[in-house]
């Protein structure tokens, strides 16, 4: 197929390069000079910024811009054509057909809330896996890279109230807008598998899962306190209440209301959730956060007998006999238990919601009413009941001794409307929050004194209380968890309806039968209790926490149109677990814990993939490798890539966890300007005025430094309207193009680091891509003659270029397979391009300017990072297969085959990162020679620049030479950040 038709008119002028003088204006330098460099932001190599110009004078920038616009729109048109073709394929899930031989690589990114606006953080979290998806597809591997919408939630309801729109219409419109933007930016999602959690054929399965949890005993109801807005007649989150206890929206004084809520018993799966953390190749800090959140502590459970109030029969209420023996348990640290046995306690507290207090033998009805009245009136109160209890281990039968061990039992209520809790001192008990612990012991040494703690510490929505122990056995060792059961009910409209009906006749809460799913109170046709047939029923009106929706969306992606099952078992079995999950570290605790809980429930209790018989495997001993691994772990893994791959494969095979590998991306921070004195944020206009003043002065403004006039402080902060520091990705893309925005975003920071978004240097990336484009067109005649020759004519590559290509390939492949340090890969490509450019400039007149195979390899390696330009260059050069989308198997491996075959691959690794490889043809008589060659490698120099280490005095603390000289690993002490 002739592909030499040029689509970009402006580029035709470039076919005959003139060898004009290099042109590099000072503003073209990148990073800009003068400013203090931001630590840990990798710079481009010196060759890129040192002012060495391209071999030809570039035409005016706007011609290039027009050319790039045309390239990108052609590329989009071509790839969306391919997308349509794939969606018309006979199977809706072409990459997941069970019959297909290879398991697809499942790349997952956290799905967005459809706010209607795409943020820089979104662009980053989709770009990172998009690079990997393109790379794997390019190598002929099957990839599954879906997207969807976390579409239920409060903002839609608020918009509905404020603007009178329908929450569903608002949500659907936002989804349409965001989908259009994402497709226009060109993220290579599998759109055929898109889901939205508000779709009835999605929430039907959310409801089904809830009912499965219910049937397996994971769901229970319990009274809890909620913030009630009496004007809007709704429950509020703590964040929606101002410091005066008023609802932010309605201004009403918020009441605390006891309401019966639905809970999911997360704690039943705690042992597995804790144990399997060891299997995960996650950033250590995320694992630590999750382990601490679960918070296991050794403890002792001490049963206690509760004595009825004098004169009250034990079963005072014949209609509601006490469901449990009249008992109580306190959970104590081993030390506190010693004190308890020694008689050092003076009272026991239970939460006012404790089921024990429902028994009128323990708390007479009148007293209960007084307590609740006081509670609703907002009065801070601790009511001591007349009840007494004694510890059951009292072995002495003497009445006096028993009397001496009697202690008051006290009900404790929240201290104010905001849900601030009365607490007892921490030292006495493990669970200090009386509203959530079964019971709390108060000591004689003055710690009976109760203290109020500041509001905000507690969130009544997320509190729950363990069911009381019914055991009256002697004290038993136990484990106490910080983790609470999950309060999943919300008094909201725009959410998944809880599929329960309440039978007023006799049955109480009854699950909606499966054939009535999806269940919505507005349209439900269920008229009778499924258990007793009574028509005295009402529908549950609460909805589920949206975290329930987002706990399993990545399973539905696999089979989104299945109307008989959540997903076909053979598809689940084939595609799971997810190979790589990319998302924000802010989801380390809640979302990632809920999703792990659901996965374990679905795969073990429900066995939806048919894996129950799978033998358990222990954690592998291999090295752990991910973007956040420490230098030693990375050094080990990179020194032995086979072992690292085996470790990853093992975790996949155990199938115990949904996301064996997690890439936790950092935030995108906006450049923020504040007046030094007042701290006020500068408006856009003030920023522009400041920037033009600063540009005239020297040095240029930089991170955290005072402005030249001392009046403005420049920092990087989370983007926010009120700080005037937000940047819309669509604006940046409109201004600079998709590839430039993408490359710049990737090169500015490794994925795990925060990205300080500052476009002052983006021009450097734009100019580099122009040079790449320019050289590509200059090479067209040579590529044309080579087009008939074998494309993998590696032998035609001169040796010095073969070595350079090989070095680049080692770095780029390692980044894309293992390391995800994208700046390293892009820097390596920039260094390689400089060599190609030099070679082309030195080419003899009349001869081919550059070996076509070398150019081909470069374009192939560029593709995952700059897909539109690489696609265009491939077409321009008449390469035999279109690159990348969809599944053009084309990778640069053949280009380096010559070098690989002729010599020994020797990697240079610095603090765990592959920075290059040594000349495979050179001789290295001993370790000292290898070490000398490694420290003389340009990749080492580049690493030192990036990390603020002086090259000639680099503190190398260790040199590891492994694999018979094929790995030279340097460990360098990095000075602390200035
Ligand atoms: Zn019934």
Image: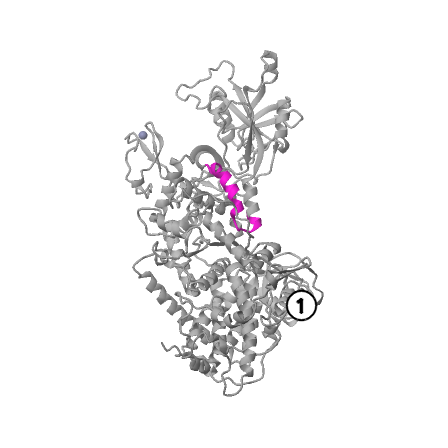
* For residue 74, side relative to residue 797 (left or right): left
- Determine the residue positioned at 61% across, 12% down: 400
Which residue is situated farthest in the right direction here? Answer: 953
* For residue 957, side relative to residue 772 (left or right): right
Which residue is situated farthest in the bottom direction here? Answer: 846
Is residue 649 depicted above or below 184 in this figure?
Answer: above
Q: The C terminus lies in which quarter of the figure?
A: bottom right
- Residue 57 visible, this angle: no
Residue 960: image x %, image y %?
A: 64, 59
Would you say residue 805 sits in the magenta stretch?
A: no
Would you say residue 273 sits in the magenta stretch?
A: yes
Residue in front for this viewpoint, 98 or 48: 98
- Residue 527 sits in quarter: top left
Local SS, label 1 = helix
- Residue 607 visible, this angle: yes
Boundaries of the magenta span: 265-286
Is residue 520 depicted above or below 716 in this figure?
Answer: above
Is residue 208 depicted above or below 849 in this figure?
Answer: above
Residue 475: image x %, image y %?
A: 56, 25
- Residue 185 sits in quarter: bottom left
- Determine the residue positioned at 31% across, 61% down: 89
Residue in front for this viewpoint, 978 or 310: 978
Q: The N terminus lies in which quarter of the figure?
A: bottom left
Q: Which residue is mark 1?
A: 929
Q: Regarding ligand 1, which quadrant of the image does it lie in?
A: top left
């Amino acid at each position: 197929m002739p592909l030499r038709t040029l689509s970009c008119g402006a580029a035709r002028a470039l076919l005959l390069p003139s060898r004009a003088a290099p042109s590099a204006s000072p503003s073209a330098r990148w990073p800009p000079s003068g400013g203090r460099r931001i630590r840990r932001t990798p710079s481009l190599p010196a060759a890129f910024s040192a002012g060495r110009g391209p071999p030809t004078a570039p035409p005016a920038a706007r011609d290039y811009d027009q050319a790039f616009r045309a390239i990108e729109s052609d590329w989009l048109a071509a790839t969306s054509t391919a997308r349509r073709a794939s969606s018309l394929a006979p199977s809706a899930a072409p990459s997941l057909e069970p019959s297909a031989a290879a398991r697809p690589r499942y790349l997952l990114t956290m799905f967005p809330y459809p706010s209607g606006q795409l943020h820089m953080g979104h662009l980053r979290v989709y770009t990172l896996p998009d690079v990997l998806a393109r790379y794997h597809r390019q190598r002929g591997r099957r990839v599954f890279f879906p997207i969807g919408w976390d579409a239920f939630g409060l903002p839609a309801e608020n918009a509905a109230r404020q603007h009178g729109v329908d929450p569903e219409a608002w949500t659907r419109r936002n989804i349409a807008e965001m989908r259009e933007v994402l497709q226009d930016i060109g993220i290579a999602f599998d759109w055929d598998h898109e889901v939205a959690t508000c779709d009835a054929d999605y929430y039907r399965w959310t409801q089904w899962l809830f009912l499965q949890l219910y049937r397996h005993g994971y769901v229970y109801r319990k009274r809890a306190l909620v913030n009630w807005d009496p004007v809007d007649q709704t429950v509020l989150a703590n964040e929606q209440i101002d410091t005066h206890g008023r609802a932010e929206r309605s201004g009403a004084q918020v009441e605390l209301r006891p309401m019966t809520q639905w809970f999911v018993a997360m704690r039943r799966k705690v042992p597995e959730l804790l144990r399997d953390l060891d299997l995960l190749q996650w950033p250590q800090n995320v694992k630590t956060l999750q382990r601490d959140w679960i918070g296991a502590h050794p403890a002792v459970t001490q049963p206690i007998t509760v004595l009825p109030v004098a004169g009250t029969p034990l079963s005072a209420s014949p209609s509601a006999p006490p469901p449990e023996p009249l008992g109580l348990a306190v959970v104590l640290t081993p030390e506190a238990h010693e004190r308890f046995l020694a008689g050092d306690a003076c009272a026991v507290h239970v939460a006012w919601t404790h089921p024990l207090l429902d028994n009128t033998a323990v708390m007479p009805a009148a007293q209960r009413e007084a307590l609740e009245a006081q509670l609703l009136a907002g009065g801070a109160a601790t009511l001591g009941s007349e009840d007494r209890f004694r510890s059951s281990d009292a072995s002495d039968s003497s009445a006096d001794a028993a009397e001496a061990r009697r202690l008051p039992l006290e009900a404790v209520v929240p201290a104010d409307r905001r849900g601030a809790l009365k607490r007892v001192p921490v030292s006495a008990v493990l669970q200090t929050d009386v509203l959530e612990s079964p019971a709390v012991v108060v000591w004689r040494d003055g710690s009976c004194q109760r203290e109020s703690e500041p509001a905000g510490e507690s969130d009544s929505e997320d509190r729950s209380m363990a069911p009381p122990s019914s055991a009256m056995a002697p004290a038993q060792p136990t484990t106490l968890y910080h983790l609470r059961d999950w309060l999943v009910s919300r008094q909201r409209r725009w959410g998944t309806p809880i599929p329960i009906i309440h039978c007023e006749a006799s049955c109480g809460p009854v699950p909606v039968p499966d054939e009535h799913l999806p269940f919505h109170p507005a349209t439900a046709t269920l008229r009778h209790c499924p258990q007793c047939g009574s028509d005295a029923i009402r529908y549950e009106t609460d909805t589920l926490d949206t975290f329930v929706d987002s706990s399993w969306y990545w399973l539905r992606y696999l089979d989104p149109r299945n109307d008989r099952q959540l997903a076909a078992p053979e598809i689940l079995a084939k595609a799971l677990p997810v190979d790589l999950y990319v998302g924000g570290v802010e989801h380390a605790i809640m979302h990632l814990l809920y999703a792990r809980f659901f996965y374990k429930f679905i795969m073990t209790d429900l066995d939806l993939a048919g894996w129950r018989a799978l033998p358990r495997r222990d954690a592998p001993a291999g090295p752990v490798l991910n973007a956040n691994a420490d230098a030693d772990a990375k050094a080990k893994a990179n020194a032995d890539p086979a072992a690292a791959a085996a470790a990853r494969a093992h975790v996949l095979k155990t199938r115990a966890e949904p996301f064996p590998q997690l890439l936790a991306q950092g935030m995108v921070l906006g450049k923020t300007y504040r007046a030094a004195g007042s701290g006020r944020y500068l408006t856009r206009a003030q920023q522009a005025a400041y920037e033009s003043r600063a540009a005239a002065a020297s040095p240029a403004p930089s991170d955290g430094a005072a402005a030249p006039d001392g009046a403005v402080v420049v920092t990087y902060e989370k983007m926010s309207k009120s700080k005037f520091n937000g940047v819309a990705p669509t604006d940046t893309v409109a201004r600079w193009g998709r590839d430039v925005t993408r490359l710049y975003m990737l090169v500015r920071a490794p994925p795990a680091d925060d990205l300080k978004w500052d476009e002052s240097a983006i021009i450097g990336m734009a100019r580099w891509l122009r040079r790449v484009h320019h050289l590509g067109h200059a090479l067209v005649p040579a590529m044309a003659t080579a087009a008939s020759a074998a494309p993998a004519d590696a032998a035609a590559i001169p040796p010095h270029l073969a070595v350079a290509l090989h070095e680049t390939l080692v770095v780029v492949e390692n980044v894309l397979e293992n390391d995800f340090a994208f700046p390293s890969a892009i820097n390596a490509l920039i260094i390689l391009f400089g060599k190609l450019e030099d070679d082309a400039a030195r080419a003899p007149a009349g001869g081919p300017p550059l070996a076509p195979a070398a150019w081909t390899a470069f374009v192939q390696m560029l593709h995952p990072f700059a897909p539109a330009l690489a696609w265009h260059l491939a077409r321009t050069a008449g390469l035999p297969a279109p690159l990348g989308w969809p599944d053009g198997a084309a990778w640069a491996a053949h280009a380096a085959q010559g070098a690989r075959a002729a010599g020994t691959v020797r990697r240079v690794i610095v603090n765990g990162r592959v920075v290059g490889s040594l000349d495979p043809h050179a001789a290295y008589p001993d370790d000292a020679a290898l070490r000398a060659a490694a420290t003389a490698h340009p990749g080492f120099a580049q690493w030192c620049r990036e990390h603020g280490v002086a090259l000639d005095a680099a503190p190398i603390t260790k040199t590891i030479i492994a694999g018979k000289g094929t790995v030279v690993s340097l460990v360098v002490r990095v000075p602390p950040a200035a």
